[in-house]
Image (tube, grey):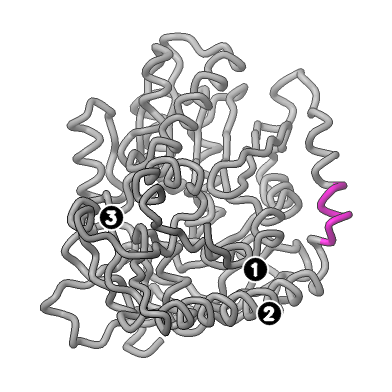
Amino acid sequence: MTMGMKDSEQSVNQCRICKGPNLTLFLALGDQPHCNRFVTKELLNREEPRYPLDLYFCHDCKLMQLGYTVSPESMFKDYPYVSGTTATLPAHFHSLAKEIAQRFSLKPDDLVVDIGSNDGTFLKGFQAMQVKTLGVDPATAIVKMANEQGVETIEGFFSGDLGEGIARERGRAKVITAAGVFFHVEDLDSFVRGVKALLADDGVFMVQAIYLVDMLKQASYDNIYHEHLCYYSLGPLTHLFRRFQMEVFDVQRSPIHGGSILVYVRNAGKRSDPVLPSVKEMLAAEEREHIYDLKTYQEFAARVERNRGVLVDMLKDLKRQGKRIAAYGAPAKGNTLLNYCRIGTDILECATEKNRLKCDLYTPGMHIPVVFEEEVWNNPPDYYLLLPWNFQQELLEKERAFRAKGGKFIIPVPDPHIV
């Protein structure tokens, strides 16, 4: 990094899952600031901490992972991301909560714990199914928001000790969920120990994560940032849970976030129902997709570099034509893209946002001013660079009026194009 490294920040010298040293660097996205550390106007001239954003492949368990860990406290204690900002995510979570409650016959006395619960969006779906819920999240302001909305939430990083403490005080959970958080975890062993301690013998642990196969196919390098330490296919996950006498018994695909997997895990030998064919089928499909081969990752890296060249050329050409361009949204993933491609205020006038926690600030690294979306309605740009492209369908529908007047969107991933 370009400024002093804290004790809790380090470069990895062993795999995060299998602990082996057999790692190969295949993609370097440069030293980048923390993607959610938005900058106030007063601090614009102060140097930001930057950290290596390098991707490694483990030859033993086949995990794709970051080679550098930023302090979790610095990333998540004042986290600005709010799950309920879009319509797509709450609809997904509420539907999934209903499916889980019905599938596993949850009763009013059963406890559901959501780890990384954010503003409680997922747990609200379980509350509608009349079961007990508890959230765990480290972000102080967002925990307060969740509790004010009636979703009981404990502030803290989930760990072995915290899982044991909740089990003593609340009893063990029939369902534990970790949606969009498992790839944030620095100490996977402690986390899984906590799940083991908290989970009922016949309980279910559900992990939702961006699926590596989809990520590679779409060249969605913007999903790579310091919060995302691991990038999961099913193979490495089965390796991890096996070490804790747990087993994956079902896996499903979901289109959310540009392609995700839902992985259902249980204590080995505690349930009589069989492991579903979906597990064996996905593992075989991953073999066919060559997900366990280094060459696949090297090809991904080459495609990422090509994407940068095409996107930057497209934006510069539009500017030469006198077109006005703004970013639509200021998501964490967008900041990876902006910093890697070096897209700054010479290209983008501003970034529009619905999340007021980010408004009146500047994006990390490239310092694009973030404004509330309504501020540009009377004088919109000619083009929006759609940074949350994973919600493309919802957002293009939302902006029908802008498009009807000739406004266009630049979709950066997988291949830059204009709609």
Q: Residue 174 location, x and y as percent?
A: 52, 22
Label 3: which secondary element: strand
Q: Is the magenta stretch mostly helix, strand or loop?
A: helix
Residue 278 percent location from the top left of the image: 79, 34
For the residue carrying disc 1, how many other residues have a C-alpha within 10 Å: few (<14), some (14-19), or many (20+)? many
The residue where tag 2 is placed is 26
- Spatial separation of the CA atoms under disc 1 and disc 3: 37 Å
At horizontal 42% and vertical 21% (from top left) the residue drawn is 126
Q: Earlier in the sequence, mark 2 or mark 1?
A: 1
- Find residue 353 and name its label: 3
The magenta segment: 284-290
Q: Earlier in the sequence, mark 2 or mark 3?
A: 2
304 to 207, vertically: above or below? below
Query: Which residue is outermost to the front?
Result: 405
- Write down the residue under mark 1: 15
Q: Which mark is residue 128?
A: none
Between 124 and 326, the one lying in front of the other is 326
Amino acid type at mark 1: Cys
Give the image location of residue 320, x and y in percent.
Answer: 42, 84
Question: Looking at the picture, which amino acid does disc 3 mark?
Answer: Glu
- Distance Cα–Cα, label 2 vs label 1: 15 Å
